[in-house]
Amino acid sequence: MIEPERGAGLTAMHEGTYAVEVDKLSKRYGEVEAVKEVSFTVEHGEVFAFLGPNGAGKTTTIRMLCTLTQPTGGRALIDGYDVSARPREVRQRIGLVFQEQTLDQQLTAEENLRFHAVLYGVAKAEVNARIDRALRMVQLSERRSDLVSTFSGGMARRLEIARGMLHTPAVLFLDEPTIGLDPQTRALMWEDVLRLRKEEGVTIFLTTHYMEEAEYADRIAIIDQGRIVALDTSEALKRTIGADTVELATGDDDLAAKNLAEAGFNVKRGDDEVVAFVENGEAQVASIIAAAGTPIRTVKVHRPTLEDVFLHYTGRQIREGQGGGPIPPHFMHFARRR
């Protein structure tokens, strides 16, 4: 079965549906409930992020959405198709990049893509054009004949994204896509991903434990211990935990706190500083300094971050290295079945 080009068949068949629609989705392994009745929707063309540490339920959710694991409760639809009732149609509409590399190191970039084209039943007449387009999108056209074993980690990751896009999916799932990559390579990879969204209209669903990576998303779902504890845009999530803080060290902190309070500012007297809680802190600095009425030694402005948000909703921080996990064995089983 040939996959129609994006916009020429798939989404038109299900106009008005969400790219991803999840209602009380659950997964239990014996006595352990890995995912606990999560519900959310993802719009077509959206970049949507699951943010959470290892063991939060991110990868388990993706496995259910990609038909690699059967839910034990609830329902999920991909581009209008039920993942349990219509798994074949779902697989035709998704691309998937796992946490760890699944490329064949002894094949060239082009050979890896051709193998994927066979698995997904891409028509022979379309294969060359699709490979050319996929390699061009991730800027690897000049390396198409090179063995993957000669690629850097970042190049291999970009090739996996090209492979995931080869059959023109409605939704591209990225499970911890930049784990193990340096910050510069992460940024380059995200240039490729956002270019795909812009040029192909593909929906991006990613899991990550990197705060800065989640900022690329249009909306972020914070998941902890199998539950979604918060879901909104990055800025909206930050606003839920309070205003900006402007911290002052002055010649007379008691006087500064008194003057600022009389001027109508919400202030707190610390041990060695005065803290004012305001909206748009950077814009308020000049008026705060003027109202303090005493010489200012230092000024620090702090805007709430995603790390603050995560700490607020979960009571803990995500430490570096708290992502990851092995490649699901279901993937290779699925590939052999294809």
Image: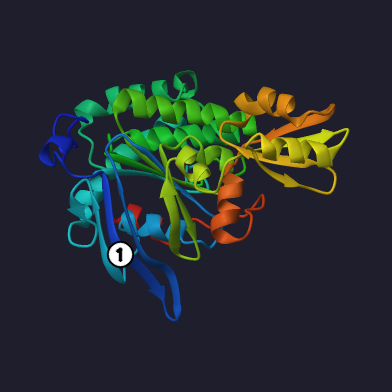
- Which residue is at the far top? 142
The residue positioned 56% from the left and 46% from the top of the image is 242
Residue 39 percent location from the top left of the image: 32, 58
Front residue (pair 308, 227): 308
Quadrant where the image shows the N terminus: top left
Mark 1: amino acid = Lys
Front residue (pair 190, 154): 190
- Which residue is at the far left? 13
The residue positioned 29% from the left and 44% from the top of the image is 119
Front residue (pair 328, 121): 328
Judged left or right of residue 98, residue 121 is left
Eyeballing the image, is 155 above or below 328?
above
Q: Which residue is mark 1?
A: 24
Residue 310 percent location from the top left of the image: 56, 52
Judged left or right of residue 19, residue 316 is right
Front residue (pair 297, 66): 297
Please rate how many residues cluster around mark 1, counting C-alpha atoms within 10 Å: few if below 14, some from 14 to 19, many from 20: some
Residue 187 percent location from the top left of the image: 56, 29
Residue 80 percent location from the top left of the image: 18, 49
Res. 211 in view? yes
Res. 150 in view? no
- Which residue is at the far right? 251
The residue positioned 29% from the left and 29% from the top of the image is 201
